[in-house]
Amino acid sequence: MMKQKGKEGMIQEIDIEADEWAEAVLLLQFRSYAVEARLIGFLDLPPLQDTVATLQQCGERFFGYMKREQLAGAISYERIEKTVQICRLMVDPDFFRQGIASALIEFVCHKEQNASEIIVTTGSTNMPALRLYQRHGFHEVEQMRMPEGIFLTKLVKRLA
């Protein structure tokens, strides 16, 4: 298992196929994405529909930020050739504004530094997330209107 010490916490790879980890990530995901759902006014966000089984079958690579032996945040991504797609970034609301999301983004940027770009998509009205990604060198490249009527913003960080 890969581990990296953060400022106050530890980032480690999560075995999402292990039921106890999948359950912990799912609980974290529900708590985190419920906040985004309220922010963007769309309560049926896809991450809120996940189950242990869908997480275990998603094919993403997960890393968790452990703080005081609790899963305080997590990030997942997929890499296809030279492109990294951040699929999920979540922080437990009890740990908001403690640098956890930044630490997870920096971890992936460092871990995948030989990629040419990192892509992420978030709700266009989720200003905290947009500002977070922009602080880390991501630039808006596209806005998409989803069939449900919400808007998503795609951001890219070029590495090479």
Image: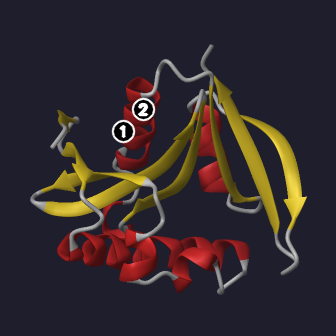
Q: Secondary structure at mark 2?
A: helix
Q: Is residue 95 above or below residue 84?
A: below
Q: Is residue 63 above or below residue 71?
A: above
Q: Quadrant of residue 25?
A: bottom left
Type of residue at label 1? Ala
Q: Are marks 1 and 2 in contact (CB under 8 Å)?
A: yes
- Quadrant position of the C terminus in the picture: top right
Furthest-left residue in this view: 69
Disc 2: which residue: 106
Residue 89: which numbered mark, if any? none
- Between the residue at mark 1 and the residue at mark 2, the CA separation in whole angstroms equals 5 Å
Q: Is residue 143 above or below residue 40?
A: above
Q: Secondary structure at mark 1?
A: helix
Disc 1: which residue: 103
Type of residue at label 2? Glu
Q: Residues within 10 Å of mark 1 (few under 14, many from 20)?
A: some
Frontmost residue, 57 versus 124: 57
Spot occupied by residue 95 in the image (x, y as percentages of width and height): 32, 61
Count of numbered marks:
2
Residue drawn at point x = 75 percent, y = 47 percent:
154
